[in-house]
Image: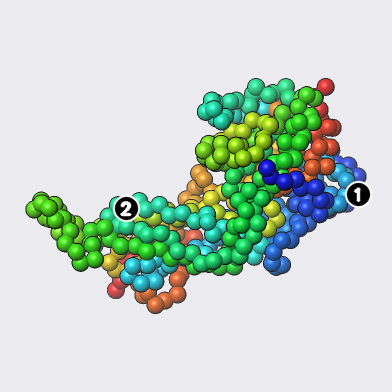
Amino acid sequence: MPLIFSMLLGLSSTVIAKTKATATAGSGATSAQDLLPAEDVFKVSARFKDAKTIELTYQIADGYYLYRKRFSVANETPQFKVGKLVSPAGRVKQDATFGRVETYRKSVRVLLPITSSDKDEGKDKGAGSSAGAAAATSSTHADTANRTVKLKITSQGCADVGVCYPPLQHDLTLLFGSGDLVMLSSTSGIGATPIAQTLSSSDRSRPALPVSPSVADLIKKTP
Amino acid sequence: MVGYLTSPESQRLSGVERHGGGVTEVLSSAAGMQAAAQMQVGGAPDVTPGVIYTATFKDMAGRPQSLGQWQNKLLVINFWATWCAPCKEEMPIFVKLHQKLAEQGVQIVGIAADTSLNVAKFAKMTSINYPLFSDEAGAIEFSKRLGNRFGLLPHTVVVAPGGAVIYTKLGLISEVEFESILRQNIPK
């Protein structure tokens, strides 16, 4: 156990230094002691907005913000194509190094275009060889039970008190075809233990479900 | 070059973590006061000098550097990242203090939770006069080991010669306060 020196000078009572509030007043953290874990600050829900678009909604606690340009998506399933993430304009703030940056507060919805690589919007795939055509046909008609798309969504944000969270990663697994959202798990920061959560959304018209911390069945089918 | 923070009003929060076993909770002075309080928050109870001095990170040339080479120094470990705006804001303070106090046995190192490419780009744009290391996952892991529960940045730890953690700060440091702490602990 290291020897720890205590050198308290000049204070007859403890005073917590207040941060310089730079944005919205509210119930945000005023000191490091009040800071919440990333999973409680940045909550994600997801749904299919339409057949070709995943909509991610981030709920952001008061006193915290996300950077617009710090979203990234990694597609781990080559049989699906994920397009560029579409994000709305954010609030502009000046960064000492990067200049003008945009941030989000309270909540933000971002969109991810997604299509199956097997289908090519009605065009004939696998042209050129009969073997290729057969293979393309076979994968186009693949068993839907195996048509899961796995995405890693990374975002990054900070607290108004003047600290930043490590990049926050959410692992998203969707079952294509039925429109169900199979599993959403989040990893707070690099190297943290994943938290498995379950969402089910058999009806696209329902509002997006919040992230639940419970571990449950991975797949819920559309009735 | 990243600008200085000179206004007392720009002082940010002071990091405090309470640990069991009677470690003193010390809180910083309010903005505008001179360095009235010594910040002392121990690292995680299981941090030993060995844990600190065997920690190894890659420098900008890709060479592994062990913190043990500075075991006779007053070692300032600053955890940061290029994506962390407050981290970059405070770096000029470390540059200034390293310039002032390096000859008196103070050694500052910056450990980035970032890619070496990003750190190299940043180093080119700025004039950082102390060693910069990078390890995306390892930096956060080590920072957490030193008491940073959520892996937040910036995080600064001061280690006395021999390996005792004598100061930690979560968030922006205050130049006046921090310099005072270093001067009071200059190795003899």
Secondary structure of the residue carrying numbered label 2: loop
Whether residue A218 is visible, yes or no, is no
Question: Which of the 4 image quadrants contains residue B145?
Answer: top right
Q: Residue furthest left?
A: A130
Q: Which amino acid does label 2 sit on?
A: Thr
| Residue in the image at 64% along x and 30% along y | B131
Residue at the (53%, 50%) spot, across then down: A167
Displayed quadrant of residue B19: top right
Marked residue chain, label 2: A
Can you identify the residue that label 2 sits on? A77
Residue A209 drawn at (x, y percent): 46, 69
- Name the residue that disc number 1 marks: A12
Q: Where is residue A168 in the image (x, y as percent from the top left)?
A: 52, 53
* Viewer-closest of B46 and A129: A129
Q: In which quarter of the image is the C terminus of chain B?
A: top right
Secondary structure beneath dot 1 equals loop
Depth check: B104 or A41 in front? Answer: B104
Residue drawn 57% across the image and 57% down it: A67
Chain ID, mark 1: A
